[in-house]
Image (cartoon, rainbow, N blue to C red):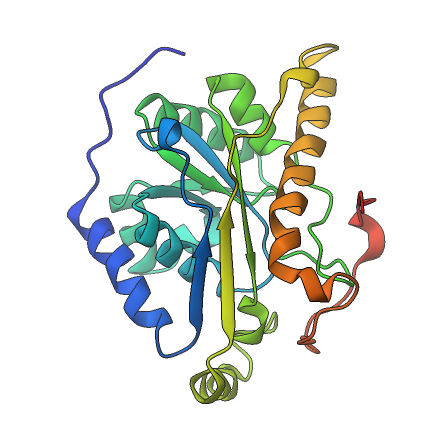
Amino acid sequence: MQTSPVWRVPRLWRLLLALSRIVVFPLARLRVSGGMPEPLRGGPVILATNHVSPFDPVIVMAACHRVGIVPRIMATGGVFRTPVVGAIMRHCGHIRVDRDTAHVADALPAAAKALAENSAVLVYPEGRIGLDPWMWPERGKTGAARMAQMSGSPVLAVAQWGTHAVIPWAAPRHLGRALLKAVLTRPVVRVRFADHPVDLSSAQTGSPGAQAMHATRLIMDAIDETLTPLRRDEMRMPRVIDVTRPHDPSRIRPRRD
């Protein structure tokens, strides 16, 4: 991978990462385990995480700040089109993904450039908040795997659990009620960084498309493995049920118990 000048983290992004922990404190009790493996700390690295709630980005920001990681987030184009927030996202160096448009492929070269600058790039391989009825990660899209192919960067699984007890799927509907409940109960939210990168060595044969699909399965399996200790007593059914969340069985993945 051809290297570029190391990315200089904008001060605003460092400030927002620190503020995320202040935002989280009254709403949840954050528990972080694992920590970034030392060889990956200076980047480049792809952080692949599961997605269960609109609150996930704030929690992952707070967890990354706690372990000393400054990620660049791949986010849907709708966020970038939002006044003020979009300008902040662009200034902070985050990566726009225009899903379901002709420009969706532009995200991969942008991510590869960020990785060439020794950045940590955070991606949600599911591409949406997962709708598996038991809240395990869905079948992933191939974007994270293609980023790894294009850049040669390692992929580290990151799992989080409990954000659905803070902000439900249907937010911003009834958001005030959800936030009040979170302040009163302060549910435990857990984030775990895997101990080692995903081993993608078995995904190096066949066509590029077949390799990407195989690598995607390995990445999703690694997220499952990282998530399992966080929901050890909730393996079949979550203790907290998000009643606003629809179920979509079309992307359920077979899991290795």
Q: Residue 62: x and y, percent?
A: 36, 58
| Residue 8 point in image, percent of width and height | 19, 34
Q: Is residue 40 above or below residue 67?
A: above
Horizontal and vertical percent for residue 86?
34, 53
Q: Classify residue 187 as left or right of residue 128.
A: left
| Up/down of 248 relative to 217, above or below | below
The residue at the point 71 percent across, 66 percent down is 234
- Which residue is at 69% across, 50% downward? 137
Position of 236 with respect to 199 (left or right) is: right
Where is residue 250 drawn, in percent x and y? Answer: 83, 51
Residue 26 figure quarter: bottom left
* 116, 226: nearer the viewer: 226
Is 143 left, or right, of 31 in this rendering? right
How many numbered marks have been drawn onto this rendered protein structure?
A: 0
- Seen from the viewer's position, the closer of residues 230 and 212 is 230
Q: Quadrant of the N terminus?
A: top left
> Against 77, is 182 above or below?
below
Identity of the residue drawn at 66% across and 52% down: 228
Residue 84 placement: quadrant: bottom left
Q: Residue furthest left?
A: 11
